[in-house]
Image: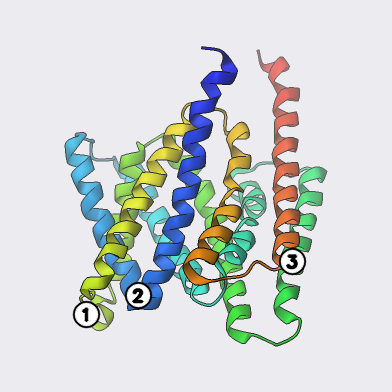
Amino acid sequence: MSPSRAFLIPFAVCCTGVALFSVMDAAMKGLSLAIGLYNALFWRALTGTLLGLGLMLMTRQRWPDAMVLRLHLLRGSVVALMAGLFFWALMRMPLAEAIALSFIAPLIALYLAALLLGETIGRQAIFASLLGLLGVGVILSGRLQGGYDRDALLGALAVLASAVLFAWNLILQRQQAQRASPIEVAFFQHLVMLGVFAIGAPFYARLPVPSAIPLILLAAGLAFTSLAALAWAYARAEAQRLIPVEYSAFLWAAVVGWLAFGERLTLTTVAGAALIIAACLITARGKRAAIAHVEPGTA
């Protein structure tokens, strides 16, 4: 099979994984509006944990050692807070707008990688960061034109806070990739999230109404399926060739938001998203150039 044809299948699987994640976000938004944010997160975490446990037993996964277990605990806690902020924001703003703002996470990850992993930040990355911040400003400006929507503006700030945690999550995910299988990562992520959310269960947990159960199952199933699809794709193709696919989430979010919630796409959201995506692609291109420059000397 030629290299171009061999890439088509991982590319298609990656596109599918990104699309499923966007549908999962919409399912969680609808679920949060129906039964409240806490119960949506709690019941999805419980369902995902049971699903993950079944897969762990079926595939006979080994129990992680102490170092990997600590990494699972840290990442699961970060993701729990990140998810709470992001889905709280989704209840107050359009899906596509929230996804667009979240795209700034890879730029934030640059600085976290420098802080936590000792990586060097080049001039091109700094320029890309400024361009990304400009994109965020364009999107936020749309919230300040005309009527002042306080809830939506707070939602935008919550997405940005979630993006910081998501950037940290990217660093932790990079550390996990060489130490645990996708099934193990997904199971422990849901298990730790369940542990975090279970703290408030005696006070806030309520049995979901029958009409909400399909959404809970859908959200948990989509989370696992999309994670497995992306893990499979990234294991079979270079990350630098699949990264642009991640930004198709904006298109899926726009379509799903319009179909499910009647959300309209604004010009400021499109313009801001374009600036942020361009900034991330500039950064990715800079990394590829750096790798190409280093490789000959390391052979």
Residue at the disc numbered 3: 267
Counting residues from the start of the chain, the first of labels 1 and 3 encountered is 1
Cα separation, mark 3 vs mark 2, equals 33 Å
**Residue 214 location, quadrant:** bottom left
Mark 1 residue crowding within 10 angstroms, few (<14) / some (14–19) / many (20+): few
Q: Where is residue 252 in the image (x, y as percent from the top left)?
A: 55, 54
Q: Residue at x 49, y 30 (%)?
A: 10
Tell me the kind of residue under disc 3: Leu
Can residue 198 be seen here? The reply is no
Residue at the disc numbered 2: 38
Q: Residue 10 carries which label?
A: none
Q: Position of residue 23 (x, y in %)?
A: 45, 56
Q: Between label 2 and label 1, give the one nearer the viewer.
A: 2
Q: Is residue 28 left or right of residue 127?
A: left
Q: Is mark 3 on a helix, strand or loop?
A: helix
Residue at the disc numbered 1: 202
Q: Between label 1 and label 3, give the one nearer the viewer.
A: 3
Cα separation, mark 2 vs mark 1, equals 12 Å
Tell me the kind of residue under disc 1: Pro
Counting residues from the start of the chain, the first of labels 3 and 2 encountered is 2
In the image, residue 138 sits, relative to residue 219, either above or below, namely: below
